[in-house]
Image: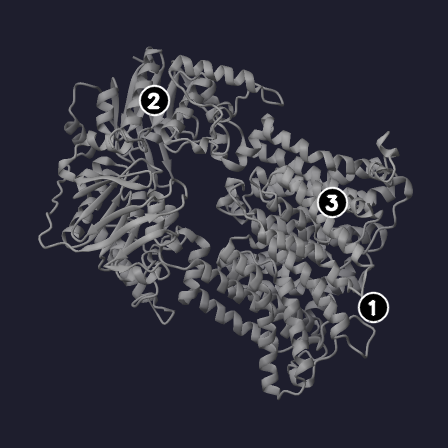
């Protein structure tokens, strides 16, 4: 309960700080209020909020799983790109799969693509001890370049000038939901399901126990018989799978294609989501909504106002991470 | 010759940033935030140049703002006991957000600042005699930042090995308990290392704008901060090997540019593949380097 | 007597949270004396000295130096007043040279180090006080005894008049310890005040003029040496008679549980192993003695199946499969690691979770990968009762327990299933005398019931008391072995240092 309370407090502080900063920079209060209303109190706005929340649930879970194992997966950004393009690729080569089968294999392809891309840093960390922060960051940059190539050339949309791929066939598209005018879609339910599943896995299974043991004290864990390399690899691959699933939200449910640069930094924001939630999956549901709607809010702001650009969301995110990262210090101050 | 020139010019920001990283990490603090600091310094220098028209001001403000950001990292990791990797990433995110924001605020465009007036850009400083040599002479007609970048690794090397501060920085990274038992404030030594490191890293950003591009473009650092970090790890936190690693990375980037104009048969190599070459090289180097046991001891518990 | 006393403590109190480390501590140290502070682990000896040294402040009470009330806020201040301390765990920078370590913090140079001058100064000190170290060597290459010399040189360089040594012989061989005391005696005659903190009664009685006895944070009294015998001292320390152990001679024909044959390996933190062979049989305790760094760390890692090696290791007459570490544990291979906090426990996990580590894939704790919380809790309660672990809260994180209780957690976890072989590394390091006795009794009982134990310890008394056979490890191989009853303490010391081959 205390956690929920402090989280809500953080939400308020986030919104409050946002308002303050924006006012300082010279945005009109009326614009702010208008944007706020649009984000939370219209069907359109709310839909977009959910659309932004779902990928954050995926990346947040991905990062959290790795954090529990003592790993830093900063490569979610690249992993989700591969997950997204994988769906298009599948649709391109197998356009006429029966519906149920198509949906299932689409999801699987997205996840596996993410896993595969995560395999590289995972292997080198688990078996060669090469630190994953730099490898994942570099792989993000490589992924951006290569996936862009695929978007612009291999799978280019023949009917449009924009930098995007062809559309996926009907069989692969997720059914619509309440927010029909927005890209929000039923992958949200998949995300919620996975959240509950991961909460169970982390705290009620052997796998979760061993992962957490390794994250807390790898030496003691190893001495008690846990195989470090195997478990770390598994955790990383699971993490990659989760990141890849962003493709389900974006391609199978949202736009039905991959647009160049569609990710407003889901991978990095996922880090904030996980940190704010202290890596607890169930709490991630809330922090992802917090940051997802923040994303939406800043977008609306840019639309309505003329001083601010949507990057203000980044700044706020950074501030939130600062606040959470120094949690120990705050706790000491308050006691 | 063109290639050598390009290598030097591309390696320079890497040299500054990685040497900054060497100092900080040698003192025991991981610096993932090199990228963010470079970006902020670049932006600050670029905007100041446009607004003030003076390259000295631009240099000064650029370096100050980078240092300021590094100071933030220092505050968070030392005083508030935050995890350096988390703080570093947060700073990168902050930089990514702050720069377009301020760019839009000052110049109405989130993607780039106006081009710098020619007076503010750094001029080539020809070295006497050497600059007049045929062919090779062009190497000695570069901006002074490049000269500094080439001498810096040796300066840092001597600093770390022979000076009081250098030895204390080493101790902060390899045996902070010993340093503190000897009566020295580990906190102060690390703070100093971070400030100097921040100063150096900012120079990388400043160079990018004032000399290399002449304009601030959104996200112009393009991962160079991370390549610098790879250089630090590959060079095992020692100035001279790190310097060589930077040269190598500069070379691969220069090569990539040359290859853009090369045709294989009738097709040109796709831009995106070429763009990824420097990162691939960095990755390959990381994978094939043996870490050895030269890393700062403090990292044994929590690496990078 | 306050006028002649150099250092005086008056009614000093200090608590760390709920733990009371020092209570009403009052005593004096005379100038130019060789003063001992003796007590079991956890008695508060280090704490009171650290407050003098400025590492933290007392909650109440006063400390006087030469009649003047002092309150040092950092070691710097203490050093400036001539007080120096050598800690149990050396405070040296491993990658710097000897001379760089000595001058660290007081370099007497501006900007660049005045290497020549500094080395001259240190060499002079070496001459004056009988040291002969190579100043250019990198500290991590030095032997433990040499590292300690560097620590003492540091104090002399800083012109300390009071030298406080905290458990200095904990990691030294008898020969190195003898050298140390020779030096200390020399320093004493040259006018220095020596304060020796130790739990080794023999040392205190042999070298100190007088000593202060502490127990559970309070001072029992200050005595002149010569007025008390070792056993009387032991009784004062414990507050009761020490328990006696009963070691059995194996009744049935013992069978080998562990066979190590010509094992070699690369070095890790110490020396690699070099064709090492040994056998441990059921019903027996085999002790391994040796200076630190002769391969113990490697041996432990190899037996834990975490380090590659050449040669063969057989457990219960079958080759040990290093890929099936968890399964080996289930077959009765137990390990008490040398460092309980870094290797034995997961400090942030609850005590209950720690108690199932290493057996966590088995019923009743987990089946088919799914956790059975009730069974885990019941098990923890049971272990807490059986081993008298306090405080009796199984959900507390392991970090909340004292050293002795933490060790009990580790031991209770390892011995919860029937073991055939136990590797026990420093099982009573940093544990108070009472808990130490209980642990010793437990180990001997298990051996009497059929367990084969390989005991690695730097405490020669413990080795001789518990072992049936003692092996000496030097330079990665076993150079000597003998039945425990037939070896003397000094013999063992000679074998360890290589004085005998």
Coordinates of residue C424 in the picture (x, y in percent): 27, 47
Q: Are marks 2 and 1 on the same chain?
A: no
Circle 2 residue: C9
Q: Which mark is residue B9?
A: none
Callout 3 environment at 10 Å: few (<14), some (14 to 19), or many (20+)? many
For the residue labelled by badge 2, is the local secondary structure a helix, a strand or a loop? strand
Mark 3 in CB contact with mark 1 (< 8 angstroms): no
In the image, residue A11 sits, relative to residue B186, either above or below, namely below
Give the camera-side residue of B170 and C87: B170
Which residue sits at x=14%, y=51%?
C448
Q: Are marks 3 and 2 on the same chain?
A: no
Between the residue at mark 3 and the residue at mark 2, the CA separation in whole angstroms equals 62 Å
Mark 2 in CB contact with mark 1 (< 8 angstroms): no
| Residue at far right of view | B118
In the image, residue A35 sits, relative to residue B198, either above or below, namely below
Q: Is residue A134 left or right of residue C192?
A: right
Give the camera-side residue of A110 and B51: A110
For the residue labelled by badge 3, is the local secondary structure a helix, a strand or a loop? helix
Between the residue at mark 2 and the residue at mark 1, the CA separation in whole angstroms equals 90 Å
Q: Chain of mark 3?
A: B
Coordinates of residue C223 in the picture (x, y in percent): 22, 20
For the residue labelled by badge 1, is the local secondary structure a helix, a strand or a loop? loop
Which residue sits at x=10%, y=47%?
C249
Q: Which mark is residue B11?
A: 3
């Amino acid at each position: 309960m205390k956690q929920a309370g402090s989280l809500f407090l953080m939400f308020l502080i986030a919104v409050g700080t946002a308002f303050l900063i924006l006012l300082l920079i010279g945005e009109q209060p009326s614009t702010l209020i208008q944007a706020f209303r649009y984000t939370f109190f219209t069907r359109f706005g709310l839909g977009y909020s959910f659309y932004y929340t779902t990928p954050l649930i995926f990346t947040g879970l991905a990062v959290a799983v790795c954090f529990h194992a003592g790993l830093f997966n900063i490569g979610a950004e690249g992993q989700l790109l591969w997950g997204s393009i994988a769906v298009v690729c599948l649709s391109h080569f197998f356009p006429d799969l029966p519906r149920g089968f198509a949906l299932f294999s689409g999801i699987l392809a997205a996840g596996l693509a993410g896993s595969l891309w995560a395999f590289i840093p995972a292997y080198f960390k688990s078996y060669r001890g090469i630190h994953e922060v730099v490898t994942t960051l570099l792989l993000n940059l490589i992924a951006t370049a290569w996936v862009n190539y695929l978007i612009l050339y291999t799978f280019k949309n023949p009917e449009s000038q924009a930098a995007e791929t062809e559309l996926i066939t009907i069989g692969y598209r997720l059914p619509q939901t309440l927010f029909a005018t927005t890209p929000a879609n039923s992958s949200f339910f998949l995300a919620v399901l996975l959240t509950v599943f991961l909460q169970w896995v982390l705290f009620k299974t052997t796998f979760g126990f061993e992962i957490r043991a390794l994250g807390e004290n790898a030496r003691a864990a190893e001495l008690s018989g846990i195989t470090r390399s195997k478990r770390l690899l598994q955790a990383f691959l699971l993490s990659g799978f989760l990141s890849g699933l962003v493709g389900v939200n974006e391609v199978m449910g949202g736009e039905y294609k991959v647009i160049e640069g569609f990710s407003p930094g889901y991978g990095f924001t996922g880090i904030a989501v996980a940190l704010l939630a202290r890596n607890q999956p169930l709490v991630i549901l809330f922090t992802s909504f917090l940051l997802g709607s923040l994303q939406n809010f800043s977008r609306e702001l840019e639309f309505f106002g003329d001083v601010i650009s949507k990057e203000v969301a980044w700044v706020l995110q950074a501030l939130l991470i600062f606040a959470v990262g120094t949690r120990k210090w705050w706790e000491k101050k308050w006691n | 010759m063109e290639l050598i020139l390009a290598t030097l010019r591309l390696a320079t920001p890497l040299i500054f940033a990685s040497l900054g990283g060497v100092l900080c990490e040698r003192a025991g603090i991981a610096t993932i935030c090199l990228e963010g600091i470079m970006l902020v310094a670049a932006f600050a220098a670029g905007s100041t140049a446009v607004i003030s028209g003076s390259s000295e001001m631009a240099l000064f403000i650029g370096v100050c703002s980078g240092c300021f950001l590094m100071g933030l990292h220092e505050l968070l990791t030392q005083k508030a006991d935050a995890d350096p990797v988390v703080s570093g990433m947060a700073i990168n995110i902050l930089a990514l957000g702050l720069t377009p924001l301020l760019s839009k605020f000052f110049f109405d465009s989130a993607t780039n600042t106006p081009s710098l007036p020619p007076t503010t850009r750094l001029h080539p400083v020809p070295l006497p005699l050497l600059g007049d040599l045929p062919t090779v002479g062009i190497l000695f007609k570069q901006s002074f930042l490049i000269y500094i970048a080439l001498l810096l690794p040796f300066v840092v090397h001597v600093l770390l090995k022979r000076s009081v501060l250098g030895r204390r920085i080493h101790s902060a990274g390899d045996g902070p308990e010993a340093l503190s038992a000897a009566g020295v404030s580990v906190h102060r030594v690390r703070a100093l290392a971070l400030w100097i490191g921040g100063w150096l890293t900012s120079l990388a950003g400043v160079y990018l704008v004032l000399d290399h591009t002449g304009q601030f473009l959104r996200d112009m650092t393009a991962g160079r901060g991370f390549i610098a970090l790879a250089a630090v790890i590959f060079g095992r936190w020692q100035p001279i090997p790190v310097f060589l690693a930077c040269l190598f990375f500069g070379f691969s980037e220069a090569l990539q540019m040359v290859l853009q104009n090369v045709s294989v048969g009738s097709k040109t190599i796709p831009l995106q593949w070429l763009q990824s070459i420097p990162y691939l090289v960095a990755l390959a180097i990381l994978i094939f380097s043996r870490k050895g046991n030269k890393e700062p001891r403090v990292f044994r518990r929590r690496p990078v | 007597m306050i006028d002649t006393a150099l250092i005086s403590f008056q009614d000093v109190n200090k608590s760390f949270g709920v733990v009371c480390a020092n209570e009403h501590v009052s005593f004096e140290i005379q100038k130019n004396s060789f003063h001992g502070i003796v007590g079991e682990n956890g008695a508060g000896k280090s704490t009171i000295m650290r407050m003098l040294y400025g590492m933290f402040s007392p909650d109440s009470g006063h400390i006087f130096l030469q009649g003047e009330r002092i309150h040092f806020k950092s070691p710097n201040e203490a050093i400036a007043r001539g007080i120096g301390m050598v800690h149990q765990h050396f405070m040296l920078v491993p990658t710097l040279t000897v001379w760089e370590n000595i001058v660290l913090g007081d370099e007497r140079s501006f900007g660049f180090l005045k290497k020549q001058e500094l080395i001259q100064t240190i060499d002079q000190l070496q001459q004056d006080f009988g040291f002969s170290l190579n100043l250019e060597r990198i500290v991590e290459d030095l032997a433990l005894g040499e590292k300690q010399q560097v620590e003492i040189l540091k104090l002399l360089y800083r012109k300390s008049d009071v030298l406080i040594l905290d458990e200095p012989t904990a990691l030294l061989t008898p020969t190195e310890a003898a050298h140390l005391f020779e030096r200390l005696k020399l320093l004493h005659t040259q006018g220095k005040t020596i304060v020796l903190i130790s739990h080794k009664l023999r040392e205190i009685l042999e070298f100190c003029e007088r000593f202060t006895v502490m127990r559970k944070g309070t001072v029992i009294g200050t005595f002149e040496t010569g007025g008390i015998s070792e056993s009387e001292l032991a009784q004062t320390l414990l507050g009761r008679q020490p328990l006696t152990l009963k070691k059995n001679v194996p009744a049935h024909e013992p069978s080998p549980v562990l066979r190590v044959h010509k094992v070699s390996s690369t070095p890790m933190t110490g020396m690699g192993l070099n064709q090492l062979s040994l056998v441990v049989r059921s019903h027996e305790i085999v002790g391994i003695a040796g200076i630190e760094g002769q391969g113990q760390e490697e041996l432990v890692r190899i037996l834990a199946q975490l380090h590659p090696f050449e040669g063969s290791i057989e457990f219960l007459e079958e080759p040990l499969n290093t890929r099936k570490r968890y399964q080996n544990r289930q077959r009765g291979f137990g390990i008490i690691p040398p460092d309980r906090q870094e290797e034995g426990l997961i400090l942030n996990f609850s005590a209950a979770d720690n108690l199932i580590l290493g057996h966590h894939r088995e019923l009743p704790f987990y089946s088919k990968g799914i956790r059975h919380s009730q069974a885990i809790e019941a098990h923890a309660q049971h272990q807490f009762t059986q081993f008298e672990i306090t405080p009796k809260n199984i959900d507390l994180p392991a970090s909340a327990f004292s050293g002795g209780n933490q060790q009990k957690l580790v031991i209770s976890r390892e011995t919860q299933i029937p073991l055939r072989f136990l590797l026990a590394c420093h099982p009573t390091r940093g544990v108070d005398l009472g808990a130490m006795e209980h642990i010793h009794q437990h180990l001997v009982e298990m051996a009497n019931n059929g367990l084969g134990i390989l005991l690695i310890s730097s405490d020669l008394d413990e080795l001789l008391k518990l072992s049936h056979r003692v092996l000496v490890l030097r330079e990665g191989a076993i150079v000597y072995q003998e039945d425990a009853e037939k070896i003397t303490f000094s013999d063992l010391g000679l074998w360890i240092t290589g004085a005998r081959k």
